[in-house]
Amino acid sequence: MSIKYIKNELYIEGLSAAQLAKLCGTPTYVYSKKLILNNFNNYKKAFKNDIVCYAVKANSNQTLLKILSELGAGADIVSGGELFKALRAGIDPQKIVYSGVGKTAEEITYAIESNILMFNIESYEELCEINKIAKKINKTARISFRINPNVDPDTHKYIATGKHGTKFGIKYEDALDMYTAASKMSNIEIVGIDTHIGSQILKVEPYRLAAVKIAKLIDRLEKENIILKYIDIGGGLGIKYENSQKPPKPAELKKAVMSVFGKYKNKTLIVEPGRSIIGDTGVMIGRVLYRKKSGNKNFLIVDIAMNDLIRPTLYDAYHNIIPVKKTFKKQIIMDIVGPVCESGDFMAKDRKFPLLEQGDLIAVECIGAYGSSMSSQYNSRKRARGVIIDGKKIIHIRRRDTFEDLLRLEENLEKIS
Ligand code: LLP
C-alpha cells in the first residue's frame, strides 16, 4: 500500500488521508484495490496450476470477495455464513474447501448441496456425520483429512495449530486408520489431504517439514490404493507488521513445498492464504479524542477501539501507527488506547509517539486481515465504515452502523411459545 508523506501530509494511494477522514468520518477502514490485485496475482503466478483458496475469515467483505472472485480465487471457509458469502460473491464452488473442527449438520448439508470441492475433516465423528448426511440426501461428499503434522510454526500460541495438543486436525499417527475407515463408507469420496500449521509464519521451513510428513502419508496411502488428487498446504504466510520482519514470498513457499511434493505429477496443490493477501492492503484512520496521564503513564485516547481492531489486545500484536500530519513534536512513551471500558483496550503499549493534540488524525497500518472481520459492537459501538481506493475513486464497501443497527436484532421479536 502506498502510504507516504507529501509536504508533511499523509497520502494513502495518492489520496490525502485528512481528506479521506473528512469524507468518510473516523474510524474508517481504508483498503487499496491495487495492492489486493498485486498480492493475489503474486500467489497466482507462484501457484499457476494450483488452486488459491482465499481464507475468507481474514476479511469477508462482499466487495473484497468479489474482487478476488473475479481474479479467479477459490475460498477456504469455516462456516455456513462464509460459504454463503463466498457463493454470493461468485466464487466457484468447485474451488471451495471447508475447514473447521465444528461443522454443524445444517452447514454440512448446505455445503454438500452447494457441491463444494471438499471438506477438510478434523475428527472421526465429523467423518461419520458427513457420510450420514450425504447418504440421507443421496449425494457423495468429497473429503480430505486435515492432518496435524506436529510441527512448530514458531508463532503466537493462539494462532499455532500444527502441534499436537491443539484442537485442530487428525493426529498424524491416526491418519491411516481414518483414511481406511473413510474408504469403506458408502457416500464418501476421498480426494485429498490437508494441513494448516498456523498463522503469521515468517519462515518456510515449518511448511517444508510439514510437507515431508504429509508426503510420507501420501506414499503410505498409495500403497493401500488410496490415491489422492489434492494436497492442501493450508495458509498462514506472515506479513510485515514490523520493519524487522521479512516474510517469505508466495514463490518461496511454493518452492519449499515443491522440494517435497514435486515428485507427484498428477496432484493439484491447494493453498489457503488470508492475511498475506489482504493484511497489508488496509489502514484504519482514526482521531485523537483526549490526552491524559495516570501515575507515570501517558495515554493518548483515540476513537479506534478493540471492537474495531482486537489484534493488539488478543495477541499482543504490533501495528504501526503514524500521525496523518507529520509532526516534529517531541516523542514520548505512551499507550494509545480506545474508548472501550477495559484495560485491555489498546492499540499500542509503551510506544514512542509524538504527543498529538485533540482532533489530530492517526493511521493504523496493516489492518486488512482480522480487523473488520473480528470487529464487534462491544460497548454498543457502531462498527466502522469501510472504503476501498480504486485508482482515484473512493468506493464505499461497508457503511457505518447506525444506532438503529444496534437494535435491529433485538426488536419486533416473534413469541417462542
Ligand atoms: N486455513 C485455515 C484452516 C485457517 O484456520 C486459517 C486461519 C487460514 C487458512 C488462513 O491463515 P492466514 O493465511 O490468514 O494466516 N485472528 C488471528 C489469525 C487467526 C487465523 C485463523 N486461521 C490474527 O489476527 O492474527
Image (cartoon, grey):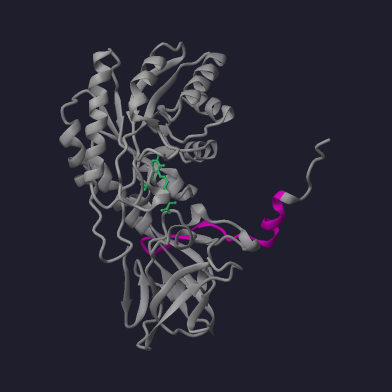
Q: Position of residue 305 (x, y in %)?
A: 53, 66
Q: Quadrant of residue 109?
A: top right
Q: Position of residue 131 (x, y in %)?
A: 49, 18
Q: In the image, is residue 211 above or below residue 296?
A: above
Using the rendered image of the protein, determine whether residue 379 is visible from the camera's viewpoint: yes
- Of 279 and 385, nearer the camera is 279
Magenta highlight on residue 12: no
Question: Residue drawn 31% across and 66% down?
Answer: 2
> Horizontal placement of 23 versus 169: left or right?
right
Q: Quadrant of residue 47?
A: top left
> Horizontal placement of 190 versus 339: left or right?
left
- Of 160 and 386, nearer the camera is 160
**Magenta part of the protein: which range?**
387-409
Q: Position of residue 130 (x, y in %)?
A: 50, 22
- Quadrant that contains the C terminus: top right
> Horizontal placement of 210 versus 87: left or right?
left
- Of 91 and 214, nearer the camera is 214
In the rendered image, the residue lying farthest to the bottom is 329
